[in-house]
Image: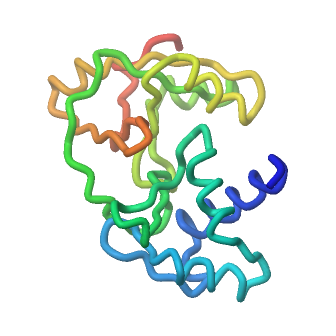
Amino acid sequence: MDSKQATRLSKFLSLHLRHRPAALGLILQEGGWVNVDGLLTACAAHGTPISLPQLNEIVEGNYKKRFAFDASGTRIRAQQGHSVEVDLQLAPAVPPAVLYHGTAPAALPAIRHEGLQKMGRHHVHLSPDAETARRVGARRGQPHILTVDAAAMHAAGLVFYESGNGVWLVDAVPPQYLGGL
């Protein structure tokens, strides 16, 4: 499978595993999981056939590790980024002292005033290093990288979660914990 096709199929899976599972007739199970066979059948029935080898390649080959199989390999889920109601069953975790967030410069005035908000998703996504934040933020042009005083947030009682692909999740980041504004 070429990279263009892999990207197209990855975006299709992201849309349906994170935002619109019902559009494929899928129901996210506890933890956000769906049966792999059911997913592949639904994809084919909706005009986007994906083979099991292609699905494996998408899961294993995606540098962001957006998707994960369960231990048995019979279920799949998106690691984070859902806009539909789902409990990913992540345990609270102690974050590193500093985390990072890449954003578009146009968003900075609102961020200065309100901090980072989850908007239509379940959590704010934070990166463990500046380079990852830069890649994430570059989706919308030249990124601006913010630092997050995660240690101070955690000490203040804010709860962090780490997804299976190393993305740190939190409900919001108040502006007083942001640097690089």
Residue 110 vertical placement versus 79 (above, below): above
Residue 42 vertical placement versus 158 (above, below): below
**Residue farthest along the top direction in this orientation:** 180
Quarter of the image for residue 147 reads: top left
Give the image's coloring scheme: rainbow
Quarter of the image for residue 27 reads: bottom left
**Residue farthest along the front direction in this orientation:** 53
Residue 112: image location, x then y, percent: 50, 23
Residue 62: image location, x then y, percent: 62, 44
Residue 143: image location, x then y, percent: 68, 22
Report the residue at 38% width, 45% height from top: 164
Report the residue at 41% width, 35% height from top: 166
Residue 31 vertical placement versus 98 (above, below): below
Report the residue at 62% width, 63% height from top: 55
Q: Nearer the viewer, residue 102 or 167?
A: 167
Report the residue at 32% width, 66% height from top: 31
Give the left or right position of residue 92, taking residue 44 as reference. left
